[in-house]
Amino acid sequence: MGRVMVKHPKHVDILDTTLRDGSYTIGYQFTADETSLIAQGLELAGIDYIEVGHGLGLGADRAGKGAQAVTDVVYMRACANSIQKSKFGFFFIPGIGDISDLKLLADEGGEFVRIGTAIESADQACRTIEAAKHLGLEVWANVMKTYAYPVSECKEWALRFVEAGADGVYVVDSAGGMLPTEVADYVAEIKDAFKGIGGQARIGFHGHDNLSLSTACSLSAVEAGCDIVDGSLLGIGRSIGNAATEVLAMVLARAGYETGVNAWHAADLAEKMIRPFLEQRWRYSSLDQALGYTQIHSGFLPVLEKVAYKKGIGVRDIILALGSDARRNVSEADAMSAADNAREQAYRRHREPYMDDGHIRDCPVTPDPSAALQPDLAKYASEIRSQSLRMARPAAIVIAGPWREDVYEETRLQQIRLLAHAVVGTIEICNAADLERAITEIDGTVDILFLDKTPRTATWNEMISKLESRTWQSQMLPYGDEIAGLIGACRIVAIEAGKRGTKVISVLGNNERARMVKSLFPYWGLRIVDHKQASIIVIAGQADNNEQFFHAGVTLVYDLMSGVIKAEIAQDLLVNGAEVIRLDGHVALVGELVGLLDAQKLADQVMGRGNVSTISIVAGGVWGREGEVVVNAIKEPTQVIGIADGNGGIKSQLSVTDARTLESVKRTLRASLLAGAMGFKFDTPE
């Protein structure tokens, strides 16, 4: 764990709130299985306190605060049946939850509850504390938005909460804007107050990371006398999130405090179970940072967003214009006033000189390799690789045949595209000899090569067959440029037709491409009619005197041949209010490449037949023999779908043997998943 600076005799607890505060991030949608697995993993990592349930606590779903994946009682039972030593508990806000919810928690094996309260409603919180203690629960009072109240007032109410029966009181940095010294002041003052009544009550700290200080604040709280601090795996939580449990464990260990938490087991659990939820979510934004900076709770965002929309001004500008009273509450009137102030400030700023030519310096611009007169394939591939490293996506090149063989004969490089799945370039090649030279030069320089296998000339087709047998250094995936382009055209035309309220189009051309596209359009709900009846014209083949097909009612011309329509005709169409769109390979590329990458993943990781222990399993559409277990993936199965009936389906009724087989596979997969999440080795029993 690294060299410990000073060894402290004090033990510090870490409460993990992944399954409660983290639920904000995923719309309160943790499943019962995920709750069970994560709770088990946290217990194995040494976490003693595990908080679960809706972000706003018991009864929040019923109160209309956001639908959760399962009921409170299902979450309770998922934990009660999964952990043995650790305690699980819930959050509770008086007015959202009901006392009957606390009784349910106690009856279902819950051991603690944290009562969230503002100072203004502290009397009600005291009554709730008394009720929860009467039920035998360990009770904590969480002073929400602690920073909004003077230390003296918080200290006074902390004593009142303890007198009501609370086992401890939490300092809560709800907006994630407190500084470590501020947290230490609150903790130290409350700690001194508790010493005056015997010192049995404990102190906790719950921080948010809007200013990236949650871990520092937690350490400061511990150094000031705090007994328990909150974290969540990878920091998943409301707004920007919380302190990361695994990092808290590391930092506290480095500072010499004993937590009983294995930080590396927690880190493994976080990587396996929580990272997938965060990969498509960028948590750090200046809006959330502004909330931390001004110490305004993210719960006020709906009001602020509503006013921002009305006033036509940025939400962040309104936040920065709010007064200090907004730390406690923000009304619509407050937000409207702040919006007016923000607009006035913006007006004054815009009238001030900001930047003139003297501030702007000429910067060298790297030339676009696709724009070079002579294509440099090595340089082009190098630029794709560079962008892929910067953007953390695979580097890919599409090797495509010519879309129009009559227009050019040289190799052409298309603009490099940043897609969600990859950084992609396209090399358009017109003859077989250039195709072989290009492959030889770029194979191995990128991660993936998409090879266009659209049938063309006999020489071209022979070269494709020859290349298929080579030993590829890059991953090679087959690609159909012709059909991808036609499908991309269908998508665009269907969208444009929907915008224009029509379901009929006309397709010009009598070649194979025109016949193909005519056969495809009906699958997008479009009917092919004569050009005189259509407001949308698609040019899919060479045609003389195109102008005869255009009339006053035409609103869109889609040039699928990319350049067949004459410039003067296009100008006339534009003057008459029609849009002219040329084929954009990017549209086709996106859909096709995403499909190919997903298909490759399906073939490599999902489809197949295998065994779990001695039980046969199938996945990914593989036809199951009667009695085989169908799972969600063959490489790393995590979910059991059912028992195959031998006829291509799933049995609706299970025999006793089927049920036992199903349960055996479920138990084994669960054990394997948990072991993998914790970084343990798991041997499947024979």
Image (cartoon, rainbow, N blue to C red):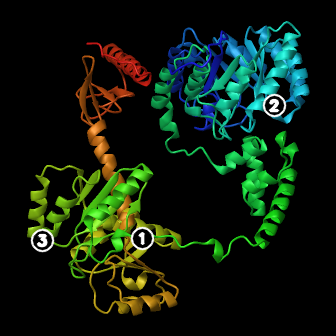
364 or 479, nearer to the observer: 364
- Residues at discs 1 and 3 in contact (Cβ within 8 Å): no
Task: Name the image quarter holding residue 437.
Answer: bottom left
- Residues at discs 1 and 2 in contact (Cβ within 8 Å): no
Tell which tag, 1 or 2, sits nearer the viewer.
2
233 relative to 134 in the view: left or right:
left
Residue type highlighted by circle 1: Val
Q: Position of residue 637 (x, y in %)?
A: 35, 29
In whole angstroms, how far apart are the C-alphas of marks 1 and 2? Answer: 56 Å
Task: Name the image quarter holding residue 430.
Answer: bottom left
The residue wearing badge 3 is: 457
Mark number, residue 493: 1
In whole angstroms, how far apart are the C-alphas of marks 1 and 3? Answer: 30 Å
At x 10%, y 52%, the residue is 469
Indicate the secondary structure of the residue bearing disc 2. helix
The residue wearing badge 2 is: 146
Q: Position of residue 133 (x, y in %)?
A: 78, 10
Residue type highlighted by circle 2: Thr
